Image: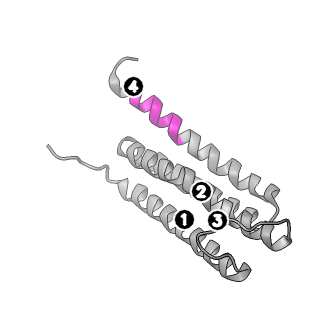
Amino acid sequence: MGLELPSEYGYVMASIAGTAFLVQYMAIGVSKARKRYGVEYPKMYMEGDSTDAKIFNCTQRAHQNTLESAPIAMVSNGVLGLAHPLTAASLMTVYAVGRFIYFEGYKSGNPNKRFPGALISMLAYFSSGLTLIVGGIRRTGLF
């Protein structure tokens, strides 16, 4: 017995791949900031309160924070897409757009500029998780 993917599952795959490219874009941004501000590996953050330290640390944290949620979002939407491919692809895309806005705002060195993107991405993140939970419970036939 094989797994049959919905015809629209390609959208899910594309949205997950796009998110993977976004994470790599952020990694490149951190690498550029490392070079610009002279932060050598394996140091994660710059010390001090200079403007350069704040910008580097915000850039690094924006990428790191995305790494904390992106794998869960990708797997959740990959599974959700088996039953609801267009919903999953849409939520994954909204998550990625929110994360892009988050990264661009945060790397400015002003942590408050991360909030619009955080709100967008977390709404999509929790919506996909909730939809997956409800769908899973319904699939059990218990409710």
57 displayed left or right of 122:
right
Of pointers 4 and 3, the one earlier in the residue sequence: 3
The mark lying in front, picked from 1 and 4, is 1
Residue that badge 4 annotates: 138
Determine the CA span between mark 2 and mark 3. 15 Å
Label ID, residue 66: 2
Residue that badge 3 annotates: 44
Colour scheme used in the picture? one colour
Tell me which amino acid carries mark 3: Met
From this view, report whether residue 49 is shown above or below residue 136.
below
The residue shown at (82%, 66%) is 48
Q: Percent position (x, y) of residue 16?
A: 45, 58
Of pointers 2 and 3, the one earlier in the residue sequence: 3
Q: Magenta region's main secondary structure?
A: helix
**Quadrant in the rendering for residue 61:** bottom right
Q: Percent position (x, y) of residue 29?
A: 63, 74
Q: Give the residue furthest to the left.
A: 1
The mark lying in front, picked from 4 and 3, is 3
The mark lying in front, picked from 1 and 3, is 3
Is there a contact, CB below 8 Å, between mark 2 and mark 1?
yes
Q: Say which element carries label 4.
A: helix
The mark lying in front, picked from 2 and 3, is 3
Residue range of the region highlighted in magenta in the rendering:
128-138
